[in-house]
Amino acid sequence: MVAASGLAPPRLVAVSCPRAARGVQRLGFLRSAPVASGPAAPQLRCCASTVDDGVVSAAAPKPRLPRVIGMGSKLIGCGSATPSLSVSNDDLSKIVETSDEWIAARTGIRNRRVLSGNETLRELSVQAAKRALEMAQVNADDVDLVLLCTSTPDDLFGGAAQVLAEVGCTNAFGFDITAACSGFIIGLITATRFIKGGGIQNILVIGADALSQFVDWTDRGTCILFGDAAGAVLVQACGADEDGLLGFCVQSDGHGQKHLNCVSSHVESILSKTNGVPNFPPKKASFSNIEMNGKEVFRFAVRCVPQSIEKALEEAGLPASSIDWLLLHQANQRIIDAAASRLDIPSDKVISNLANYGNTSAASIPLALDEAVRAGKVKAGDVIAASGFGAGLTWGSAIVKWG
């Protein structure tokens, strides 16, 4: 029997999956040879095997450790990357009616980095990931999973696969997580669940966003806030007694979406002949600019972020006094200060690089962490209370131990 595409339907066969040395046979599909042959096509890789136009042939991937569930997780490496173009408050004052003093007093921001020329978010993500692997002293082909936390991928269908390919993670699977400013925390927690429940060994968690592409640069209420960047951490399996994720809390409330969003917009189709079908074809989709009710978002953050951290601390069985570093999503210095005050954490234990980069969405936490680690502030064994919050509305906190 020949399928409508002109290809014979797939044959169900048992094939060995070489990713894990478990001696387990898995059912897989082998595509029968096509009816009409054509020029040689580029080869793809499937489960560390080579897929050509006819059959799957086993490659020789690096053997993986047996999957053991119930393992703990530890953060052993970090990296970051930012665009070359820096835009200061004074630069913005030439575009909109504002000033350095006005912006700094209300946000704490003085500069931000913005993609320009041929720079892409994928390139920043790749740089950050490679630097995290270098610090962790882990080879790219030892990575099992790549989580790309972004709301602004270069490709609408996702960017994790392209990033892991360019990094050289030949044995890894990857996918995107879309949660804007909460994305990295959600990705970090997701990584630990894959390790605990799926027996994964090494996971790259990348937070990357380029919100400058969705900013209305004539709106001084939003254009002053956002910058572009990427940050990454390497999360590795460890013994349960060494688990570096001490507690976490994640929450969402869709009713708050009206206060912070970047919704799709539609343009009428240029087709005039629709064969009598009403409302066809669908309108062409694009995205509007970021819209934010600053006062409501501020109220939400100063109320919910400390509560979230307190819940995570409760799960960890730790008092706030045990926190060595408070690391919040870098949205507004007033939010950071308010949360620190409520948790009674002194300013010298608060990590902030907001003044130099602005709000980099999912990249802000790993970017600030990377700078703090490389500067020698955060040391092995330090307890960090990290919290992300933003669009959705979504928010989450994690109490983690570095190293």
Image (cartoon, grey):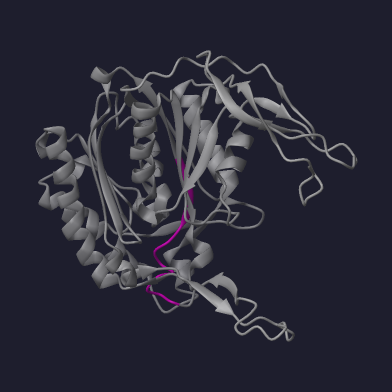
* Relative to 309, 281 lies left or right: right
Queried whether the magenta region covers residue 229, the answer comes back as yes
Main SS of the magenta segment? loop
Q: Which residue is drawn at 50% across and 14% down?
A: 22
Let me know if residue 350 is in the magenta part.
no
The magenta stretch is 219-231
Specify the quadrant that holds the N terminus: top right
User: Which residue corresponds to the image point at 35% horizontal and 29% vertical from the top-left?
Assistant: 197
Which of 68/226 is in front?
68
Look at the image and tell me whether residue 288 can be seen. Answer: no
Identify which residue, 136 or 259, lies in the foreground. 259
> What is the number of callouts on the image?
0
Q: Can you say whether 115 is above or below 62 in the image?
A: below
Question: What is the x, y in percent for residue 193?
Answer: 34, 33
- Viewer-nearest residue: 120 or 179: 179
Q: Would you place residue 349 above or below residue 87 in this image?
A: above
Residue at 30%, 22% in the rendered image: 70
Q: Where is residue 145 in the image (x, y as percent from the top left)?
A: 49, 32
Q: In this view, does 336 lie above or below 16?
A: below
Is residue 150 in view from this perspective? yes
Looking at this view, name the residue that lies furthest to the front.
1
Specify the quadrant of the image occupied by residue 154. Answer: bottom right
Residue 320 location, x and y as percent? 11, 39
Residue placed most toward the observer, 378 or 132: 132
Residue 6: x %, y % from top left = 82, 47
Specify the quadrant of the image occupied by residue 10.
top right
Q: Describe residue 209's horizontal placement relative to residue 47 as left or right.
A: left
Quadrant holding the C terminus: top left
Residue 352 falls left or right of residue 95: left
- Residue at figure coordinates x 50%, y 21% from the top left: 138
